[in-house]
Image (cartoon, rainbow, N blue to C red):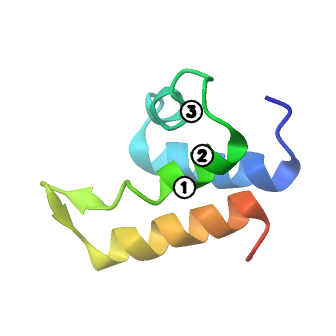
Amino acid sequence: YNFAENEIVGLTSFMFNLGPGALNQVTANGTRSKEEIANKMLEYINSAGVPKQGLIKRRQEEHNIFTGSGA
């Protein structure tokens, strides 16, 4: 990948919160497009199998940073 600065910042936040294995998971070991990665980031919203409002908000913020659609 040739990630832009905003994409690196969004992924860094995502990985910080989910752990180092999250990058391989969200990129499917480098096989997903950037659009697919952005959409996949929004799926990591559960805690103990239950969607949590705080995680929904955080993933949306990280998605927005990654896509350049928000600060």
Residue 6 left/right relative to 28? right
Q: In which quarter of the image is residue 30?
A: top right
**Secondary element at image label 3:** helix
| Front-most of residues 17 and 7 | 7
Q: Which of pointers 3 and 1 lies earlier in the amino acid sequence?
A: 3
The three-letter code of the residue at mark 1 reads Asn
Residues tagged 2 and 1 counted as in contact (Cβ below 8 A): yes
Mark number displayed over residue 67: none
Where does label 1 land, which residue? 39
- Residue tagged by mark 2? 36
Residue drawn at the location 36% of the way across and 68% of the way down = 55
Q: What residue type is labelled 3?
A: Thr
Q: Which amino acid does label 2 sit on?
A: Glu
Q: What element carries label 1?
A: helix
User: In screen coordinates, is 55 left or right of 49?
Assistant: right
Q: Whole-percent x and y of residue 43?
A: 39, 56
Neighbour tally class for label 1: few under 14, some 14-19, many 20 plus, Cα within 10 Å: some
The one of 42 and 21 positioned closer to us in this rendering: 42
Q: Name the residue under label 3.
A: 27
With 8 as the anchor, is 17 left or right in this view? left
**Cα–Cα gap, marks 3 and 2:** 8 Å
Mark positioned earlier in the residue sequence (3 or 2): 3
Up the image or down, 7 lies above or below 50; here it is above
Residue situated in front as seen by the camera: 62 or 19: 62
